[in-house]
Image (cartoon, coloured by chain):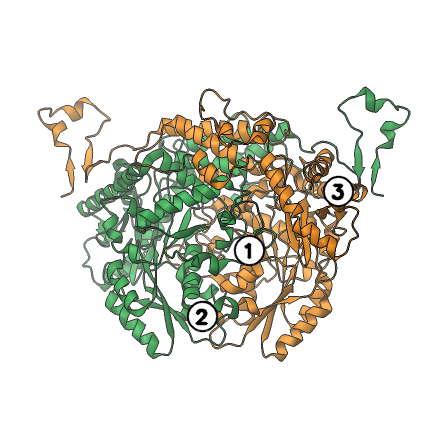
Chain colours: A orange, B green
Amino acid sequence: MLVHQWEEHDQGDTDWKEMTPGKKIPVFVDGVVLNGPQTDVKAGEKFVEEACRLMMEEVVLKATNVNEKSTHGQSSGSSSTPILGATGNLVNHELSLHLQVCEWQPPEQLRQLLDLEMRDTGESQDKLLKLCQDVIHFSVKTSHPRFFNQLYAGLDYYSLGARIITEALNPSIYTYEVSPVFLLVEEAVLKKMIECVGWKEGDGIFNPGGSVSNMCAMNLARYRHCPDIKEKGLSGLPRLILLTSAECHYSMKKAASFLGIGTQNVYFVETDGRGKMIPEELEKQIWQARQEGAVPFLVCATSGTTVLGAFDPLDEIAEVCERHGLWLHVDASWGGSALVSRKHRRLLHGIHRADSVAWNPHKMLMAGIQCCALLVKDKSDLLKKCYSAKATYLFQQDKFYDVSYDTGDKSIQCSRRPDAFKFWMTWKALGTSGLEERVNRAFALSRYLVDEIKKREGFKLLMEPEYTNVCFWYIPPSLREMEEGPEFWKKLSLREVAPAIKEKMMKKGSLMLGYQPHQGKVNFFRQVVISPQVSREDMDFLLDEIDSLGRDM
Amino acid sequence: MLVHQWEEHDQGDTDWKEMTPGKKIPVFVDGVVLNGPQTDVKAGEKFVEEACRLMMEEVVLKATNVNEKSTHGQSSGSSSTPILGATGNLVNHELSLHLQVCEWQPPEQLRQLLDLEMRDTGESQDKLLKLCQDVIHFSVKTSHPRFFNQLYAGLDYYSLGARIITEALNPSIYTYEVSPVFLLVEEAVLKKMIECVGWKEGDGIFNPGGSVSNMCAMNLARYRHCPDIKEKGLSGLPRLILLTSAECHYSMKKAASFLGIGTQNVYFVETDGRGKMIPEELEKQIWQARQEGAVPFLVCATSGTTVLGAFDPLDEIAEVCERHGLWLHVDASWGGSALVSRKHRRLLHGIHRADSVAWNPHKMLMAGIQCCALLVKDKSDLLKKCYSAKATYLFQQDKFYDVSYDTGDKSIQCSRRPDAFKFWMTWKALGTSGLEERVNRAFALSRYLVDEIKKREGFKLLMEPEYTNVCFWYIPPSLREMEEGPEFWKKLSLREVAPAIKEKMMKKGSLMLGYQPHQGKVNFFRQVVISPQVSREDMDFLLDEIDSLGRDM
């Protein structure tokens, strides 16, 4: 037998058990003592407390202050490593007096600065906390008011509080029995988002990313088109075609390839000069596909394209879809948040006619990565029919409660995080009016930036934005006198103005924003305003800084 | 023009600007003041602090103490709602002296107890904190030493600390420029996990769940089999077949349907009495598929099946795959953690011959939901070739650093959480030996439970476990004298013994473990040991409690 009492303790001390009431005789199995918990609880709790303290001091309290001193390397004797010196980068050293957006290190050097290796034995608490400090120090401060690099930014305190509680509770939301609160919260948030879209009822699920939401919508549309595909697959069927604009998110291609549809069967519809899908071109492409013997089943419109922030004309696209019996999915991952603004929701006019909508509150509404809803208009349980696999170990039908609350079988995931909860907390804290104010302010700041760009020498707007994506070129002094012909654009491109300025700003750590070439246009900057911590001063700083970094080019 | 100065302030006070140095004239755009940040920073910071305090007091400090008093409804005047009384459930009331695993409320009642609605205006801080308390109170305590309901449990302090920091930093790991630290950490963790599998090199990516990892492996195998499918899709191709055991995770079917392969093209290979795939049957099915004119491309073996915890014989399966040129994927989502134990890794003998492995450290290694790696043996950049969509706005090729560090294009996601980081922190804290100890202890506790089940009247083991899944029936006294024939099993099933006991334990809140019918066997309990906070006493309690709840049946 593997189980035996610890004989040593019993020998010659027959009263041991009685003499220590409450203590039990240690039980060994396979050399492991099984009495009592094994963990050093006190040390663990202390670590969590210290991590909270670091998180508050080094991230939260500094999030709003662009002039905050960096304390790295100065904190209570924990660091004797000359981290700032190690780079040999004097610019960084000068800037250490201010909180940088990032402290740039090339991969090889950063790998040396961090102690990444996992060893056979554990590290001391002090060492672990030092590691945490290093992780914070060398991470990009996405809550910094001058981080404009992606479609998320800033710090929402209410979401963060909710996320901290979530991490400790560590739930997975597939069944009501293990996640009662979070499933009800998800239901409430979905209901409210569905209202924003303009549907009376609907269904939905939170997914780990807008890309996954788009994939799920695509699969759902395919299921509605031909339920047999779930069981029989695509083999032997004619080509299925989905149509989307040339400006759509790249996840459309990823999804088409993942779902076995193939990227060649994504038909890209031409857009107008502002990046909006042309409904007439859509209709042409549908006919074209049919003539080829292929089967169009889905149109994906975009509300808020990634680069230009363009909104497809949903009403006209819905007309086309209705005429052809096609599923209309709207990728409003980025633009969906305009729905909470009475002033700006007109950008998504017609969205209520969509069959499904992807909307990521982790972008403009700052719910924290990730928070992505797929909303579905259908009320006939299509989502469940399409996705369910009916695992008997998880979705037992003989439970003592209403198992329609076990919504996990609507998802492609098994374990699933309660992403609705953090957004719910923010919505509770700010109210719909607070969310609206946030969106309106982001629009207003973008307006301000656009007007400044127009006023200032050396800046050239790509186009009037519809949303908060402000796209522009910086023209260095040496090119300002040139005529805007092919030669001009060639020079702007060959001198790598945007990449070079980006490199300088990263190394200085003063600012982060993205650049890209797009549809034949050479590299330009894309500035996106999201966070309410951002102010007019940051917009001015942005332009001043780009000018100061690019003036010599 | 939309931009204008705030004239009121300037009127009749021309020196205002000079008199308040540092203050700037307010700028309005579209009725929004753009100077300075908008958020009430102090209130926000306070909320995060209070959330941390609640998280520590109500979740972390209580995680290890099964006798902790519940403070809900007793805390400083914040609750006048008679929450415990509202259910009319006296059992709950009695139990309020102890920290329950769960405080059961049916959906309709819980919806009334919680204030779920999001309104136009925001709630007060006090109200928000009360909501947080309610969320904690009514949530299942997955870190409670008597939560055995899923394949995750317990609280890892080091992972939690890392997760708290992550939430505040709010990173998305697609490019090195925005996530330098987390991408290097992911690289280091993948490298170490690849070592555990027994490969010298390899590639990999963290995914939001084992289901997604399995899907991604399936797509990768398909791409290796026929790269053209990425562009052309499956239309017109012969049926692709994947083979897996009858005991595999349900995500195999979900994946096959999602990828356009079809659930009918998942061929389920017979298992032996212990739930292990029979290699001879696998080979037969491969021939069978070929005879049908279909094309097998993938075998998915399971290391640690969900219900029985069975391990497929990888060496023999690898032989078959090599003979037939098929990709071997091992779903070690659950069982992979045995790889860190020198004693128990023999269960996965032959895993180094796999082409890909899914392994979820969020299960037995307690990294927190979710933490799921897909590991790939290929060194020819297959993962990137298969998944990349080369979005020019994100994965620019003219960056100033080595863009091979921009690993996001290997994923089906765009935004992606740094799930490797929390696991890295735990690994750093415990060392490989600490992880090993944790796994060995879980095995030993399961051994103890098995032996207790064999000793005790009224408990019947389903089979000797290979892993930490201990499956057993509880036989109520009224059935103990019956012979174990069809009549006996029929009665055990008709009386709904397991579901009824589950209902009682949920309503009492003393314990949570799962039950299911499986492969013709009537409902049985599945007990899984994971957390190092669990001790022998909890195993004894488990059996005592089931007996006490079921004795009258």
Q: Residues within 10 Å of mark 1 (few under 14, many from 20)?
A: many
- Image point 55% across, 44% down: which residue? A369
x and y percentages locating residue B434 in the rendered image: 30, 36
Q: Which mark is residue A211?
A: 1
Question: Disc 2 to disc 3, how far (Cα)?
Answer: 63 Å
Q: Is residue B148 left or right of residue B415?
A: left
Say which of A381 and A348 sits in front.
Answer: A348
> First in sequence: mark 2 or mark 3?
2
Query: What is the three-letter code of the residue carrying label 1?
Result: Ser
The quarter of the image holding the N terminus of chain A is top left
B210 versus B144 height, above or below: below
Q: Which badge, 2 or 1, comes first in the chain's sequence?
A: 1
* Quadrant occupied by the C terminus of chain A: top right
Q: Residues within 10 Å of mark 3 (few under 14, many from 20)?
A: some
| Element carrying mark 2 | helix
Give the number of the mark in front: 2 or 1: 1
- Residue under label 3, please give it: A477
Q: Is residue B134 visible?
A: no
Badge 1 sits on which subunit? Answer: A
